[in-house]
Image: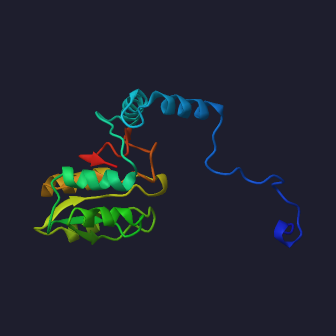
Amino acid sequence: MGKLAVNGGEKLRTRAFPSWPMHDQREKEALNEVLESGKWWYGEKVKQFEEAFAAYQDAKYGITTTNGTAALEIALIAAGVGAGDEVIVPPYTFVATATAVLKANAIPVFVDIQPDTFNIDPQRIKEAITEKTKAIVPVHFAGLPADMDEITGIARQHNLAVIEDAAHAWGSRWRDRGVGAIGELGG
């Protein structure tokens, strides 16, 4: 094996990686079209995006929000989660998964992940359910869907809402369904 480039070996890449975000003339034109329309929030482009994204996810509806955190906060409140309720979440995720629960005045209950998938462990979900549990928020981590068959089965058995955090996995599929569109709500 040769030397690494950092140690004087041959470089594999001679150009710098492109900066982010990347865009081209199409994005500039689309942005200008929206800016010039005077409809910065719920204009035709937003409606078109929501419909296209819902279809892509195999969902009946798609609603834009400012970010995934807001989507989770809205979903929890829409599911009736409130003061004193417990919501099962994995500890291995972005902080918003748990803080959205706090924003709904509920209590996040951390349930460990499976070491081979980094997704919440369905067996441990069963062990964490109490009379105060109102919802389960599985995170589809790094593009790998959580075991939604097990999770939705547990939720049905205990009359719990499933609110998917799919921020890490848009485009991923579970049993030919888009993640984020399998539980009652997704964000």
> Residue at horizontal 32%, vertical 39%?
63
The front one of 111 and 17 is: 17
Q: Is residue 40 visible?
A: yes
The front one of 69 and 90 is: 69
Q: Residue 146: image x %, image y %?
A: 37, 55
> Residue at horizontal 60%, vertical 34%?
28
Position of the N terminus, as image quadrant, is bottom right
Q: Residue 109: image x %, image y %?
A: 25, 71
Colour mode of the rendering: rainbow
> Residue at horizontal 34%, vertical 66%?
90
Q: In the figure, 109 relative to 76: above or below?
A: below
The front one of 81 and 171 is: 81
Q: Residue 158: image x %, image y %?
A: 13, 58
- Determine which quarter of the picture holds residue 84: bottom left
**Residue at the extreme left of the image, as rendered:** 131
Q: Is residue 121 visible?
A: no
Q: Residue 169: image x %, image y %?
A: 45, 50
Q: How many marks?
A: 0
Looking at the image, residue 89 sits to the left or right of residue 15; the answer is left
> Residue at horizontal 29%, vertical 50%?
149
